[in-house]
Amino acid sequence: MKHIIGAIAKAIFRDYYYDLVYWLLIFRKFPAVRGNKPLIIIFNHFFAQDIEALKRANDSFELMVIEAVPFRYVGIDLFPKGVDSFSVFNDPALDDIKMRYKHICDRLIARIIHKYHPVAFVTPSDNF
C-alpha cells in the first residue's frame, strides 16, 4: 500500500515529490531560527569522525550536518538499477536523468541558502 501511495504522489507531483522527501529526511529536524553565529553546512558522506573533530575544534560557527542518505534515496529512485559506478553514471544515455536530478538538488540547495544563509558548505571526503 505504501508503494502505491508513493507512486501516485510521484505521478501527481513529479519532481516536487522529492522536495517532500528531502523535507521529511532533512529539514524537519532543523530549527527555523538559529543563533547569532555564522552557519557552516556540512554534507556528511560517511565521514562522521571528521565532523566530530570539526565540532570539537569549533567555537566560532554553528554547524548543521546534512546526511548524504536522502540524496542517495532520490538517486536510487531516479536512476535505473546498476548505476552505481562512474563508468555507468557517465553514460550519455543518462544525461536527461542527470539533469533532472541536478534540478531537484538545485531546488534543495536554493531552499537551504534561502532559509539558513550559510557562509560555507563543507563536504569532508578522502576522494578530493
Image (tube, rainbow, N blue to C red):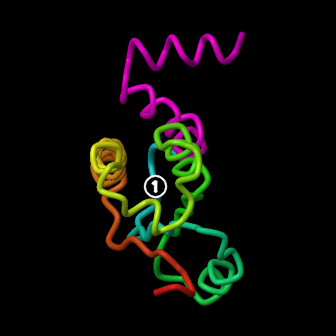
Q: Which of 63 and 91 is in front in this view?
A: 91
Q: Position of residue 56 (x, y in %)?
A: 66, 85
Q: Nearer the viewer, residue 59 or 101?
A: 101
Q: Judge left or right: residue 88 versus residue 94.
A: right
Q: Quadrant of residue 67?
A: bottom right
Instruction: Give the answer, above or below, for where 65 lies relative to 19.
Output: below
Instruction: Give the answer, above or below, for where 21 lies relative to 1.
Output: below
- Residue drawn at the location 54% of the way across and 58% of the way down: 66
The region drawn magenta spans 1-30
Q: In which quarter of the image is residue 122?
A: bottom left
Q: Is mark 1 on a helix, strand or loop?
A: loop
Instruction: Give the answer, above or below, for where 107 lies relative to 91.
Output: above
Q: Judge left or right: residue 46 versus residue 117.
A: right
Q: Position of residue 29 (x, y in %)?
A: 60, 44
Q: Nearer the viewer, residue 70 or 41?
A: 70
Is 4 included in the stretch rendered in magenta?
A: yes
- Residue drawn at the location 51% of the way across and 11% of the way down: 8
Q: Residues within 10 Å of mark 1 (few under 14, many from 20)?
A: few
Q: Judge left or right: residue 82 versus residue 92.
A: right
Q: Where is residue 93 in the image (x, y as percent from the top left)?
A: 32, 49
Residue at mark 1: 34
Residue type at mark 1: give it: Arg
Q: Is the magenta stretch mostly helix, strand or loop?
A: helix
Q: Judge left or right: residue 96 versus residue 80.
A: left
Is 99 included in the stretch rendered in magenta?
A: no
Q: Which of 61 and 99 is in front in this view?
A: 99
